Amino acid sequence: MIKQINAKELRIGMYIVNLDCSWLNHPFTLNKFIINTDKDIKKIHDANIKLIEIDTLKGLDVSFETNSLIPFSINSERKIENCGAKAEMKAAKIAFKEAKIFISNLMASVKMGQHVELEQINPVIKKLSESILRNHNALLALTRIRKMDHYTFEHSVSFSVLMMSFAKGMGKSDEFIRLVGTGGLLHDIGKTMTPDHILNKPGKLTPEEFLIMKEHVVHSRTILEKTPDLSQISMDIAVMHHEKIDGNGYPEGLKSEQISLAGKMSAIVDVYDALTADRCYHDGKDPTEALNFLLKGAGTHFDPELVQKFIQSVGIYPAGCLVSLDNDHLAKVVEIKGSMLKPVVEVFFNIKTRKEIPSQIIDLSTQSKLKINGVDRFENWNFKPST
């Protein structure tokens, strides 16, 4: 939607479609572009431009919170108070939407030859990481809501969220959490150089096409080597997420001792997110199936100890998934507070009567009799995943 705003309302992530001045007089080569840095905003202010038109479908709206413009220090440790998943959901939705818009625009810019700059990424990671630190279940629930035609962008954001949740679950520092979040968001940046007919092919790739697809990791390294001050942790995630500890991964065929901690973590996250996402050529597996796949690959593809830690971080029944209870009710998992087998759920449907019932939050860890029968799919009951 096209909206006219005051220049004072400008922020990183907005998509400009018109500046209220002659094209010859404004400081940009294009009349339509994404605001990537504070420098872009300063140029508009310095040119004394007062009114601007933005497209809220291609970039951020003024309705978003503006605290992402607070200066970000990668080395600063902040005390962030925990809260419930329900209370965190509003902020998580904002952070998640901003991140999807950002990575979509960033990939478009990189495809046109622009470089990746950390000052563009830091505000996005700041919001995501702070939401993770308050309650990671809110963002994890949002990763369950996907659109097949937006897979590349949504996979990047979900990958980032899962990496940060993983790191938090391992007790890592706030700084490490941010760095793996940055690496996660950028890990597939090399796909901007993969031909569209291969990247978006609605089916299995031929061996020749798969060889071309695998080159995206090398392309990611090439692109990110031009990013000043990018941490080695973030780079490792981009270049090692397809390596396997038995040496049968790509692009380098590294073995366990050659793969960094972040690299080993990213291999687990990449497979888990890919397996659980719906694609045009297959339905995503339920979380328990994906976790079983990881367990089968532990010791060959994945580090066994890290697989266990990943399961502990996301849970057997992750936030956002649909479960059936042994009292014939359907419920959505809200968060995990204690036992992975007994999360907090929101009951909303009676399977026997096939009717919705008044929504009720139940902490299964306090219910000695009520148990989860298994994971179900929203589509089986004509429901759309929601938060």
Image (cartoon, rainbow, N blue to C red):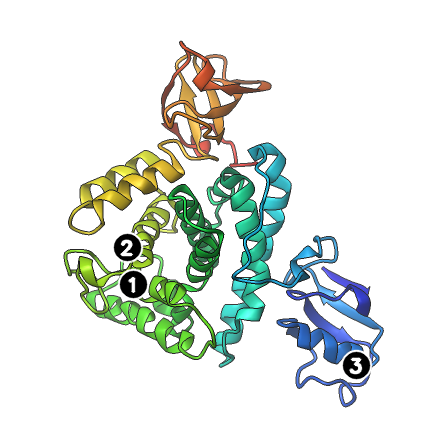
Quadrant for the C terminus, please: top right
Q: Which residue is mark 1?
A: 240
Q: CA distance from mark 1 to mark 2?
A: 8 Å
Q: Residues under labels 3 and 1: Cα distance?
A: 43 Å
Lateral position of residue 249 relative to residue 150, left or right: left
How many residues crowd around disc 1 within 10 Å: few (fewer than 14), some, or many (20 or more)? many
Q: Residue furthest top?
A: 369
The residue positioned 19% from the left and 41% from the top of the image is: 296
Name which residue type carries label 2: Lys
* Residue 37 x, y percent position in the rendering: 63, 72
Residue type for callout 1? Met
Q: Position of residue 220 (x, y in %)?
A: 37, 71
Q: Residue 46: which numbered mark, if any?
A: 3
Horizontally, residue 320 falls left or right of residue 131, namely left
Q: Residue furthest bottom?
A: 24
Q: Earlier in the sequence, mark 3 or mark 2?
A: 3
Three-letter residue code for mark 3: Asp
Residue beneath the point at 39% across and 31% down:
317
| Depth order, front residue of 378/155 | 155
Q: Secondary structure at mark 2?
A: helix
The foreground one among 324 and 157 is 157
| Quadrant in which the N terminus is drawn | bottom right
Secondary structure at badge 1 equals helix
Q: Nearer the viewer, residue 191 or 256?
A: 256
Element at badge 3? helix
State the count of labels: 3
- Image quadrant of residue 51? bottom right
Tag 1 near tag 2, CB within 8 Å: yes
Image-based side of 171 in relation to 117, left or right = left
| Pointer 3 or 1: first along the chain | 3
Q: What numbered label is drawn on residue 264?
A: 2
